[in-house]
Amino acid sequence: MTRQERYQSAKEIYKKYGVDTDAAMEKLKEIPVSLHCWQGDDVKGFDQDGPLTGGIQTTGNYPGKAQTPEELMADLEEAMKLMPGKKKLNLHASYAIFEEGEHVDRDKIEPKHFKKWVDFAKKHNMGIDFNPTFFSHNKVKDGLTLSSPDEEIRKFWIEHGKACIRISEYFAKETGIPCVMNIWTGDGYKDIPADRLGPRMRYKDSIEQIIAEPHDPKLVKPCVESKVFGIGVESFTAGSSEFALMFAASHDGVLPLMDNGHYHPTEVVSDKIPALLCYFDEIALHITRPVRWDSDHVVLFDDETKEMAKEIVRNDALDRVDMALDFFDASINRISAWTVGFRAWQKALLSALVTPSAKLKELQDNNKLTELMALQEEIKTLPFGDIWEEYLERCNVLGGMEWFKEVERYEKEILEVRK
């Protein structure tokens, strides 16, 4: 059978379960997913030459990483050619681009330092999401930034956050698409602290000062992201899950952001998504793949990835969840890492869109739990692969392993010749 014949067969099978596969694919084409720039250069950025600090670490030294803005943009373009669906660009503040001989510290960055990124986004009809960079800087004092007891240090980072609010609004005005601005720090302590309240009260005050920077809430969506622990801060993090959720719940216009690597290994974000949707009109999600703990492995089409997508789709929350990828692996080809991760999340969303959720809910509500289990098992072996290949074809993106041949060509012709 040809690919098209296989799709027509699969379409008819799904139709028996009340699923319109054509409609599912058309819907997926319009769902934006934010693509993170930092996979391409191992979170290095362009505003400092020092090592990664503040709980951030990459492992591996695969050749060919981007070392200039031009190389990073070229690599992003190569990866995006291999990704179906709608994209946004996700930037960290450390990716500011300065003119030759120019440099300003993070508390003084301006929209002009991101103009080339705006030009890039416009070229590809993308919005931009943004993250202040509270790591890899000499003013991360004793592992602390926004929660620091040193008021000079704390003030520096507050000003950085305010600058990022202004830059976020610039992005939104230039692209015509709202900017999700995520506040995350690695602030915490390696061992048991004597004071847990003080750092959190300072952290709360700092974020309040940042979001008080004048901005249009229709254009800028500030988020607070939690973390259970980090490298060097194993015993205490200021921005815990409870802190972030309560901050968002008690401050208008602030979204909670869940990263599915930032929880205990026995917790699953798929269960947290519908819980938050009970109380928040909008939430944000960073999609990664933790291995035991937060290790930011490349996203795969695995069980929890599929479950998160199911919860978003089955609860009609595609326009209520701001979705972004967040992983970095320096041990493999970085173009491939981007592509595998983005395609995996697209697969998860498409799989969720062709799941007969209405029927499953009906069985649950009518306590037909025996039939529910049977149907849940039956749909696991439906010919989803044929639907996925058709979606790739409709998005003019290479299917099967043909995309990987393009990655190999790019590596040989471009990446291997980089210094």
Image (tube, grey):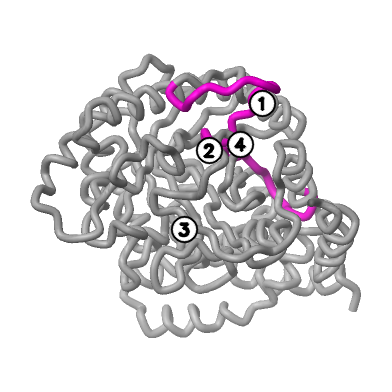
* Secondary structure found at label 3: helix
Closest to the camera, between mark 4 and mark 2, is: 4
Check disc 2: other Cα within 10 Å, few if <14, some if 14-19, many if 20+.
Answer: many
Q: Which residue is mark 4?
A: 46
Q: Distance of mark 1 from mark 4, alpha carbons?
A: 16 Å
Q: CA distance from mark 2 to mark 1?
A: 13 Å
How much space separates mark 1 and mark 3, taking CA atoms?
34 Å
Q: Residue at x 64, y 24 (%)?
A: 98
Q: In the figure, 224 relative to 308: above or below?
A: above
**Tag 3 residue:** 314
User: Which mark, by number, is residue 92?
Assistant: 2
Residue position marked by numbered label 1 in the rendering: 118
In the picture, residue 17 is in which quadrant?
A: bottom right
Amino acid residing under circle 2: His
Name the one closer to the observer, 162 or 346.
Answer: 162
Along the line of sight, the residue nearer the viewer: 66 or 29: 66
The residue drawn where x is 27% and y is 62% is 234
Mark 4 residue type:
Phe
